[in-house]
Amino acid sequence: MTDANVGGRVTIYDVASKAGVSTATASKALNDTGRMAAETRARIRRVAEELGFRPNALARSLTSKRSFTVGLLTDDIYGRFTLPVMAGVSEGLIDQGVSVFLCSVGGDPALARIHLDAMLDKQVDGIIATGKRVDRPLPIDFSAVPVPVVYVLTEGPAEAITLVPDERQGAREAVRHLIQRGCRRIAHITGPEHFLVVRERALSYRQTLEAADLRVPAADVLYGTWSEHWGHEAVARLWSFDERPDGIFCGNDQIARGVMDALRERGAAIPHDVAVVGFDNWEIVAEETRPPLTTIDMNLKELGRQAGLTLVRLVNGEEIEKGLLQLPCKLVVRSS
């Protein structure tokens, strides 16, 4: 075994680096595509053989007959959800240097059309449509697009492939964790009720309490905004009841941070008096709370990785079952 692959599987980046070329050039040489000097192609192949490079079969099939590019179209202008998804897509296609062409459209149909046309002009192999709400489509119709489309974290048509987190499973993990910690009066503070994910998590919250023979508190589910301010306000409401919670499941990490600030202001020790679990695992929030926040990770990077691999299979003409695919969330235990 050579030094290059002692730490793990050799990638296209290792070959390109050793040969002194770009990943796209290395990929073209190994797949016998593109224009380059014969001696360059031979040198790259020789380096690959010396390093023991084994290309990813799916990506190899994609790049051997396509443009090395997939499009990622999103209405998530801040990138909170899209950037982890994009990282996963890139990771899934890393071996052959397939690049990702990202365009943000907000809610503007005209801008979405312009960006989609630009992607098609660049002859992308396929498109991943992603967003920030699973119950809303992007502001453009993909039905006439001549390349495969995979949907992630946005509403796709019934005949398409759509990947989303398993919201009910994630909420169940959160509530079970609180129960296992000994909490018996568990409140749920969450975002606007018109969001599908809010309703799914609230349903799972109630079902998990019922399965554990615990009753839903008198306050029931507290619906509000996705903000720290709402977390403060919701705790004030809970503290107006005679029975106060010993566990709080929050609909996102921003709400959870507001909840924890409000609990400290009332002299409640976290997690001794009240344990708190968030949802999102937004690390810049979760790791900086006091104490660091236990939360649910939606595995956005894995969603992106699976979307990329699924798109490759579609480009290759494989038959894949259409419909909604839910990927599991995971509990990230910290100190709250």
Image (cartoon, rainbow, N blue to C red):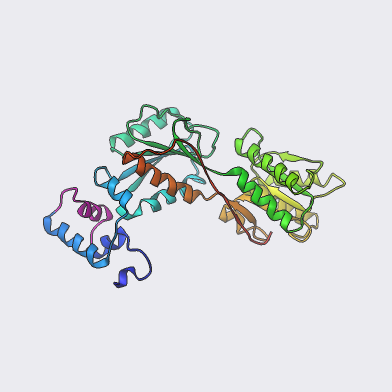
Q: Is residue 133 left or right of residue 183?
A: left
213 vs 176, nearest the viewer: 213
As drawn, the residue found furthest toward the left would be: 38
Quadrant assignment, res 116: top left
Quadrant assignment, res 265: bottom right
Say if 108 sits above or below 284 in the image: above
Q: Is residue 24 left or right of residue 155?
A: left
Quadrant assignment, res 284: bottom right
Could you tell me which residue is drawn at 62 percent across and 49 percent down? 279
Whether residue 2 appears in magenta in the rendering, the answer is no
**Magenta span covers which residues?**
20-36
Q: At which x and y percent is residue 184? A: 79, 52
The count of marks equals 0
Q: At which x and y percent is residue 155? A: 50, 33
Could you tell me which residue is drawn at 69 percent across and 45 percent down? 229
242 vs 47, nearest the viewer: 47
Say if 24 sits above or below 318 in the image: below
Of the 4 image quadrants, the one containing the N terminus is bottom left
